């Protein structure tokens, strides 16, 4: 079992920055990938950024490339999402997730999910 707890959400004006954190506990060594997802009202959940934990490979949705950065602190077992140049369309509930299975990180098929943290970007 892997437990995930997000924090760092809040309200920010367009152009501003936020950093989301996701503290992982439990059998964290079993995780193959970790990712950030978001879901806006009336929309499907989408993957925002993903990171392979066996190396440094990362991937991003086109909508956030160049603005968001995903990172992982192995000493703290904590996943981060640095959000810069925020846009109103970034407003959503953000979730972190852990995937145990091999075969790529850019997928919705993750095994463990956090409760989410709300991000609101005002224009």
Image: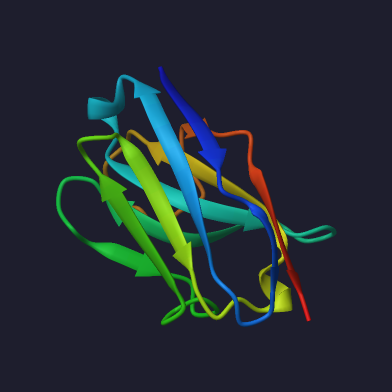
Q: Tell whether 110 sits left or right of 33.
A: right
Q: Is residue 23 left or right of residue 8?
A: left
Q: Residue at x 44, y 79 (%)?
A: 65
For residue 116, side relative to residue 75 (left or right): right
Q: Residue at x 32, y 45 (%)?
A: 33
Work out which quarter of the rendered image holds the N terminus and state it. Answer: top left
Q: In the rendering, at what x and y percent does residue 43 appear?
A: 77, 61
Total marks drawn?
A: 0
Determine which quarter of the picture holds residue 91: bottom right
Q: Quadrant location of residue 29? A: top left
* Residue at position x 46%, y 78% in the image: 67
Q: Residue at x 28, y 35 (%)?
A: 76
What sort of colour scheme is used for the picture?
A: rainbow
Residue 2 percent location from the top left of the image: 41, 23
Q: Is residue 109 above or below residue 90?
A: above
The reply to whether residue 103 is visible in this rendering is no
Q: Quadrant of the C terminus?
A: bottom right
Q: Quick one: which residue is furthest to the left in this view?
A: 55
Q: In this view, which residue lies farthest toward the right?
A: 42
Left or right: 120 with respect to 117?
Answer: right
Relative to the observer, which residue lies in front, 68 or 57? Answer: 68
Whether residue 91 can be seen here: yes
User: Residue 118 location, x and y as percent?
Assistant: 70, 50
Q: Is residue 123 above or below residue 69?
A: below
Residue 87 location (% of width, % of height): 66, 79
């Amino acid at each position: 079992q892997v437990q995930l707890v997000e924090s760092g959400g809040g309200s920010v004006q367009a152009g501003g920055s936020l950093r989301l954190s996701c503290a992982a506990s439990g059998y964290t060594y079993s995780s193959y990938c970790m990712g950030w997802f978001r879901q806006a009202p009336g929309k499907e959940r989408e993957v925002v950024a993903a990171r392979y934990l066996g190396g440094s490979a990362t991937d991003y949705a086109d909508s956030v490339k160049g603005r968001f950065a995903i990172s992982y602190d192995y000493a703290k077992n904590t996943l981060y999402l640095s959000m810069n140049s925020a846009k109103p369309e970034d407003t959503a509930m953000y979730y972190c997730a852990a995937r145990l299975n091999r075969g790529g990180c850019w997928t919705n098929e993750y095994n463990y999910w956090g409760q989410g943290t709300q991000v609101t970007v005002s224009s």
